[in-house]
């Protein structure tokens, strides 16, 4: 694995653990795709640092269990400003 990829994998993982960020949020911050972040933390990270990989996995599992809540919040914000009157 190239050094810049290894550094990104560790940096992304530390960011996710520190901020409890979602894959999408981490992708935005680091300027890469969601697929890249996902591959970094699920495939590459365990080869670099097993302990950190376990921490990241816990955060991602928590995020996954809460995603239906975040989706509902986003929908509420989207339609909050629109009127409910249809004449």
Image (spheres, rainbow, N blue to C red):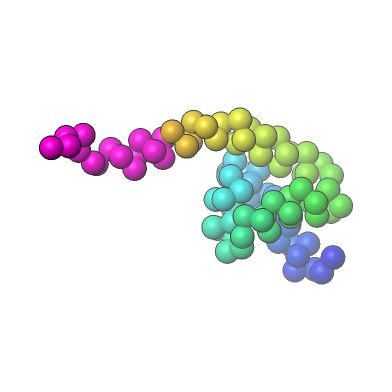
Q: Is residue 86 magenta?
A: yes
Corner quadrant of residue 19: top right
Q: The magenta stretch spans which residues?
A: 73-87
Q: Is residue 83 magenta?
A: yes
Corner quadrant of residue 74: top left
Q: Residue at x 39, y 38 (%)?
A: 75
Which quarter of the figure is the C terminus placed in?
Answer: top left
Q: Residue furthest left?
A: 87
Q: Nearer the viewer, residue 10 or 39?
A: 39
Residue 51 location (% of width, % of height) = 81, 41
Whether residue 63 sits left or right of residue 69 in the image: it is: right
Q: Nearer the viewer, residue 37 or 68?
A: 68
Whether residue 57 sits left or right of residue 83 in the image: it is: right
Whether residue 28 sits left or right of residue 8 in the image: it is: left
Q: Residue at x 56, y 31 (%)?
A: 66
Residue 30 location (% of width, % of height) = 59, 61
Residue 8 location (% of width, % of height) = 71, 61
Whether residue 76 sits left or right of residue 84 in the image: it is: right
Residue 45 location (% of width, % of height) = 79, 51
Q: Residue furthest front?
A: 87
Which quarter of the figure is the N terminus placed in?
Answer: bottom right
Q: Nearer the viewer, residue 25 or 71?
A: 71
Corner quadrant of residue 64: top right
Labels in figure, total: 0
Q: Residue at x 34, y 43 (%)?
A: 78
């Amino acid at each position: 694995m190239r050094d810049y990829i290894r550094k990104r994998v560790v940096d992304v993982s530390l960011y996710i653990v520190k901020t409890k960020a979602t894959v999408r949020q981490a992708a935005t911050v680091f300027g890469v795709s969601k697929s890249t972040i996902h591959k970094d933390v699920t495939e590459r990270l365990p080869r670099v640092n097993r302990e950190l990989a376990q921490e990241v996995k816990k955060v991602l599992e928590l995020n996954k269990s809460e995603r239906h809540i975040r989706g509902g919040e986003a929908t509420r914000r989207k339609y909050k400003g629109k009127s409910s009157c249809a004449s």
